[in-house]
Image (cartoon, rainbow, N blue to C red):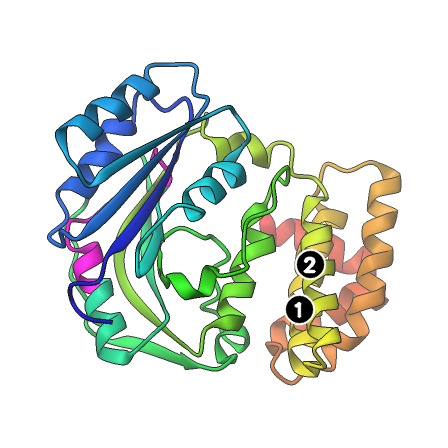
Amino acid sequence: MKKSSLISIIVPVYNVEKYLCRCVNSLLKQTYHNLEIILVNDGSPDNCPYICDKYAEQDSRIKVIHKSNGGLSSARNAALDVMNGDYVFFLDSDDYLHCETLTTMLDIANQYNAELVQCSYFRGKKDVFPNIKIKRNVEIYLGNSIFYSNKQNIIVCGKLYSSKLWQNVRMPVGRVNEDDFTTWKLYYKADKIVVTKSKFYYYYDNENSITASQKKKLKLDFVDAYKERIAFFYEKNEVLLTKISQWRFCLPLLNACIQGSLTKEEKAFCRKLFEENACDAIKCSKVKLSHRLLISGYLYYPSIIAWIYRIIMK
């Protein structure tokens, strides 16, 4: 893509009157200007609809979609259906960006001919972006190699995607952890992924955010996400990716069994799924030794490993 590529930025908006201006202002301050900023008012009950419309009046790059409340996935999908960008970037409305984010990430995409560029992020409750060093060194992942690394980041935000990756991909409506169902598909479709350690994205810890409220309801919604992922790779005859997905699945299952606020029946269900996937996971050469030991230990000595795990996680 050329340097003049259009970047569509998708911002779902719901009940964030306190944070919305900071978010949108961080986009208007970007040093890269060829932007399509799509604010999706997802039936917000506060003054967000008015704020969105005011911004659209002030800057022609801003488009507003007003829709009835359908949740985070529904809002993002509505924007994906109408976006025009060569690239797409997702930003939650209580988060914000460093001013050089899109310039740098697009430069990386152009330099390395990458379909997906991933940045690092700060997390906290600051209203001013910390001073950062823009790091020029990057990590390049070809084919499916990112699945074998520790650079997988399931969060859909903080990534610059070629819009082509989103063809025939949409986020599941009605799910709590929609990113778990989606991001791995984009990793799989991308021929080249570049990861920069530069912390361009500020993830604001808002206890009332959509994501935070969803986490309280999370429980076992991750199960369907991983089962779908494992089945997909199995049907594609991607043996190694199937085992890696089983490994990734075992870790939240283990945590749910030991620390999750689940019923006795739910823990038994998780334990059964853990046993079904653990044997293949520990045979995978790409799995870290420490994780193989943890998974095999919990498979054969669950009480001992649970006791040790609780001590470590305190």
* First along the sequence among labels 1 and 2: 2
Give the number of callouts.
2
Q: Is residue 149 magenta?
A: no
Seen at 52% across and 25% down, the residue is: 69
Coordinates of residue 255 in the picture (x, y in percent): 68, 51
Q: Dot 2 surroundings within 10 Å: few (below 14), some, or many (20 or more)?
A: some
Coordinates of residue 107 in the picture (x, y in percent): 19, 69
Find disc 1 in the rendering and name its residue: 245
- The amino acid type, in three-letter code, at marker 1 is Ser
Q: Is residue 221 above or below residue 194?
A: above
Q: Are marks 1 and 2 in contact (CB under 8 Å)?
A: yes
Question: In this orientation, does residue 84 appear?
Answer: yes
- Residue 196, by quadrant, is bottom left
Q: Dot 1 surroundings within 10 Å: few (below 14), some, or many (20 or more)?
A: many
Task: Report helix, strand or loop for mark 1.
Answer: helix
Does residue 256 appear left or right of residue 288 in this picture? right
Residue most extreme to the bottom: 285
Does residue 140 appear left or right of residue 307 in this picture? left
Q: Is residue 33 above or below residue 242?
A: above
Residue nearest the observer in this picture, 114 or 96: 114
Residue nearest the observer in this picture, 210 or 134: 210
- The amino acid type, in three-letter code, at marker 2 is Tyr
Find disc 2 in the rendering and name its residue: 226
Q: Quadrant of the C terminus?
A: top right
Residue most extreme to the top: 46
Seen at 85% across and 66% down, the residue is: 276
Boundaries of the magenta span: 92-104
